[in-house]
Image: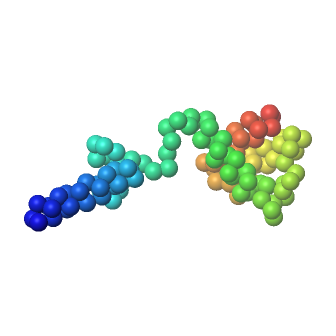
Amino acid sequence: MKRALVSATLLALVVSSTAAFASGSTGRGTAGNDWGTKVKRGTNSLISNEDRLLVQGRAQVRRYITCRSCDYHNKLNRETAPEVAQAVRAGRFEIRDNRRAAVLAYIKKRYGI
């Protein structure tokens, strides 16, 4: 009887630890790798810096330039892109200074100006 109880307990322990490892849980409560060091969430080393800049620029364009209540909603195209780029450089939109470069890079890449 004692042997069966020990076996059942060990089996339950093995099954639960296997499920935890399969789910990617480290048991530390924080994101980590096999060496116990923290991993920065939300980063992808496969994306180049240029692609990150373009993604950030696209998000800023959608938020501040082509939103539903914005002046260029459904109007940003190859013809209006130079005008928008000039307005971004002049500070007409509420885009932070450190994000203007991303917006200009996105407009340049997307509309070829």
Q: Name the image quarter holding residue 11.
A: bottom left
The percent coordinates of residue 103 (x first, y second) are 70, 45
Q: Residue furthest front?
A: 1
Count of labels in the image: 0
Residue 37 lies, with reference to residue 47, above or below; the image says below
Residue at left offset 25%, top offset 60%: 12
Residue at image position (77%, 59%) is 67
Residue that appears at 74% across and 45% down: 89
Q: Nearer the viewer, residue 23 or 72?
A: 23
Q: Position of residue 54 (x, y in %)?
A: 66, 41
Q: 90 or 22, which lies in front?
A: 22
Q: Quadrant of the C terminus?
A: top right
- Residue 27 appears in the figure: no
Towards the viewer: 55 or 85: 55
User: Residue 112, can we see it?
Assistant: yes
| Image quadrant in which the N terminus is located | bottom left
Q: Residue at x 17, y 58 (%)?
A: 7
Q: Is residue 95 left or right of residue 7?
A: right
Residue lying furthest right: 79
